[in-house]
Protein backbone atom coordinates (compact mmCIF):
# COMPACT_ATOMS: atom_id res chain seq x y z
CA UNK A 1 0.00 0.00 0.00
CA UNK A 2 2.80 2.41 0.92
CA UNK A 3 4.45 1.82 -2.47
CA UNK A 4 1.22 2.79 -4.25
CA UNK A 5 0.91 5.98 -2.18
CA UNK A 6 4.56 6.85 -2.83
CA UNK A 7 4.09 6.22 -6.54
CA UNK A 8 0.95 8.40 -6.73
CA UNK A 9 2.54 11.23 -4.74
CA UNK A 10 5.66 11.16 -6.91
CA UNK A 11 3.59 11.15 -10.11
CA UNK A 12 1.34 14.00 -8.98
CA UNK A 13 3.97 16.24 -7.42
CA UNK A 14 6.56 15.42 -10.10
CA UNK A 15 4.16 16.19 -12.96
CA UNK A 16 3.13 19.47 -11.29
CA UNK A 17 6.76 20.47 -10.80
CA UNK A 18 7.56 19.58 -14.40
CA UNK A 19 4.61 21.55 -15.77
CA UNK A 20 5.45 24.60 -13.68
CA UNK A 21 9.12 24.34 -14.60
CA UNK A 22 8.36 24.01 -18.28
CA UNK A 23 5.96 26.94 -18.24
CA UNK A 24 8.45 29.10 -16.33
CA UNK A 25 11.24 28.19 -18.75
CA UNK A 26 9.27 28.75 -21.94
CA UNK A 27 7.11 31.72 -20.93
CA UNK A 28 8.19 33.31 -17.66
CA UNK A 29 6.25 36.49 -18.34
CA UNK A 30 2.95 34.73 -19.10
CA UNK A 31 3.39 32.26 -16.25
CA UNK A 32 4.03 34.97 -13.67
CA UNK A 33 1.14 37.10 -14.91
CA UNK A 34 -1.23 34.26 -13.91
CA UNK A 35 -0.18 34.95 -10.30
CA UNK A 36 -0.57 38.70 -10.59
CA UNK A 37 3.15 39.36 -11.12
CA UNK A 38 3.89 41.67 -14.05
CA UNK A 39 7.38 42.07 -15.45
CA UNK A 40 8.85 43.84 -18.45
CA UNK A 41 10.67 42.48 -21.46
CA UNK A 42 14.25 42.69 -20.15
CA UNK A 43 16.07 39.62 -21.57
CA UNK A 44 18.36 39.42 -18.53
CA UNK A 45 15.42 39.36 -16.11
CA UNK A 46 13.60 36.80 -18.26
CA UNK A 47 16.74 34.65 -18.27
CA UNK A 48 17.00 34.86 -14.47
CA UNK A 49 13.35 33.84 -14.17
CA UNK A 50 13.64 31.01 -16.71
CA UNK A 51 16.69 29.40 -15.08
CA UNK A 52 14.86 28.04 -11.99
CA UNK A 53 12.31 26.58 -14.40
CA UNK A 54 15.02 24.21 -15.61
CA UNK A 55 15.68 23.04 -12.06
CA UNK A 56 11.96 22.47 -11.51
CA UNK A 57 11.60 20.62 -14.80
CA UNK A 58 14.56 18.33 -14.12
CA UNK A 59 13.47 17.63 -10.53
CA UNK A 60 9.97 16.82 -11.78
CA UNK A 61 11.49 14.38 -14.28
CA UNK A 62 13.54 12.75 -11.51
CA UNK A 63 10.39 12.37 -9.41
CA UNK A 64 8.56 10.70 -12.30
CA UNK A 65 11.51 8.33 -12.76
CA UNK A 66 11.32 7.51 -9.04
CA UNK A 67 7.64 6.70 -9.47
CA UNK A 68 8.31 4.06 -12.12
CA UNK A 69 11.68 2.77 -10.90
CA UNK A 70 11.46 1.90 -7.19
CA UNK A 71 15.24 1.95 -6.73
CA UNK A 72 15.15 5.72 -7.42
CA UNK A 73 12.12 6.47 -5.22
CA UNK A 74 14.12 7.55 -2.16
CA UNK A 75 16.24 9.97 -4.20
CA UNK A 76 13.11 11.33 -5.90
CA UNK A 77 11.38 11.87 -2.54
CA UNK A 78 14.40 13.67 -1.11
CA UNK A 79 14.93 15.85 -4.18
CA UNK A 80 11.25 16.75 -4.38
CA UNK A 81 11.14 17.55 -0.67
CA UNK A 82 14.15 19.84 -0.99
CA UNK A 83 12.75 21.72 -3.98
CA UNK A 84 9.19 22.07 -2.68
CA UNK A 85 10.47 22.87 0.82
CA UNK A 86 13.02 25.34 -0.48
CA UNK A 87 10.37 27.24 -2.40
CA UNK A 88 7.97 27.22 0.56
CA UNK A 89 10.60 28.40 3.03
CA UNK A 90 11.82 31.02 0.56
CA UNK A 91 8.29 32.35 0.17
CA UNK A 92 7.80 32.44 3.95
CA UNK A 93 10.99 34.44 4.41
CA UNK A 94 9.94 36.78 1.60
CA UNK A 95 6.56 37.25 3.27
CA UNK A 96 8.25 38.29 6.51
CA UNK A 97 10.74 40.59 4.75
CA UNK A 98 8.70 42.06 1.87
CA UNK A 99 5.11 41.72 3.01
CA UNK A 100 2.04 39.82 1.86
CA UNK A 101 2.08 38.63 -1.78
CA UNK A 102 -0.95 37.90 -3.92
CA UNK A 103 -3.49 35.29 -2.82
CA UNK A 104 -2.26 32.94 -5.56
CA UNK A 105 1.26 33.05 -4.14
CA UNK A 106 0.05 32.49 -0.58
CA UNK A 107 -1.81 29.42 -1.87
CA UNK A 108 1.36 28.28 -3.65
CA UNK A 109 3.28 28.60 -0.37
CA UNK A 110 0.79 26.40 1.46
CA UNK A 111 0.81 23.79 -1.32
CA UNK A 112 4.62 23.79 -1.46
CA UNK A 113 5.06 23.35 2.29
CA UNK A 114 2.38 20.64 2.50
CA UNK A 115 3.87 18.77 -0.45
CA UNK A 116 7.37 19.03 1.04
CA UNK A 117 6.10 17.62 4.35
CA UNK A 118 4.39 14.74 2.52
CA UNK A 119 7.51 13.96 0.47
CA UNK A 120 9.78 14.13 3.53
CA UNK A 121 7.40 11.90 5.49
CA UNK A 122 7.33 9.31 2.71
CA UNK A 123 11.11 9.59 2.35
CA UNK A 124 11.56 8.95 6.06
CA UNK A 125 9.22 5.96 5.92
CA UNK A 126 11.10 4.66 2.87
CA UNK A 127 14.40 5.10 4.75
CA UNK A 128 13.13 3.26 7.81
CA UNK A 129 11.86 0.39 5.63
CA UNK A 130 15.23 0.19 3.88
CA UNK A 131 17.05 0.01 7.21
CA UNK A 132 14.82 -2.84 8.37
CA UNK A 133 15.27 -4.77 5.13
CA UNK A 134 19.07 -4.71 5.55
CA UNK A 135 18.98 -6.19 9.04
CA UNK A 136 20.13 -9.80 9.39
CA UNK A 137 17.17 -12.25 9.37
CA UNK A 138 17.64 -13.22 13.02
CA UNK A 139 17.12 -9.57 14.05
CA UNK A 140 13.74 -9.44 12.33
CA UNK A 141 12.34 -12.38 14.30
CA UNK A 142 10.62 -11.97 17.64
CA UNK A 143 12.97 -12.80 20.53
CA UNK A 144 10.63 -15.50 21.94
Image (cartoon, grey):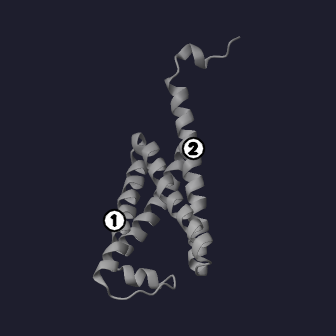
Q: Could you tell me which secondary element the residue under label 2 belongs to?
A: helix
Say which residue appears at 41% left-offset and 48% top-offset: 66
Residue 89 in the image, given as x and y percentages of width and height: 56, 61
Q: Could you tell me which secondary element the residue under label 1 belongs to?
A: helix
Quote the CA–CA distance across marks 1 and 2. Answer: 30 Å
Residue 37 in the image, given as x and y percentages of width and height: 48, 84
Along the line of sight, the residue nearer the viewer: 100 or 109: 100
Q: Nearer the viewer, mark 1 or mark 2?
A: 1
The picture quadrant where one finds residue 14 is: bottom left
Mark 1 — residue?
Answer: 54
> Is 50 located above or below residue 120 in the figure?
below
Which image quarter holds the C terminus? Answer: top right
Tag 2: Cα neighbours inside 10 Å, few (<14), some, or many (≥20)? few
Along the line of sight, the residue nearer the viewer: 144 or 130: 130
Single out the residue that lies furthest toward the right.
144
Which image quarter holds the N terminus? Answer: top right
Drawn side of residue 20 relative to residue 25, left or right: right
Residue 83 in the image, given as x and y percentages of width and height: 47, 58
User: Is residue 141 something one can see in this rendering?
Assistant: yes
Tag 1: Cα neighbours inside 10 Å, few (<14), some, or many (≥20)? some
Say which residue appears at 57% left-offset and 44% top-offset: 2
Mark 2 — residue?
Answer: 2
Amino acid sequence: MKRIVTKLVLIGSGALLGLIGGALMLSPKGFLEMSGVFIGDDPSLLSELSAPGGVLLMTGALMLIGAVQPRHAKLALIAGGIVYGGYGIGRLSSLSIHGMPSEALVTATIIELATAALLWGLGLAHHLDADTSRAPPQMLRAPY
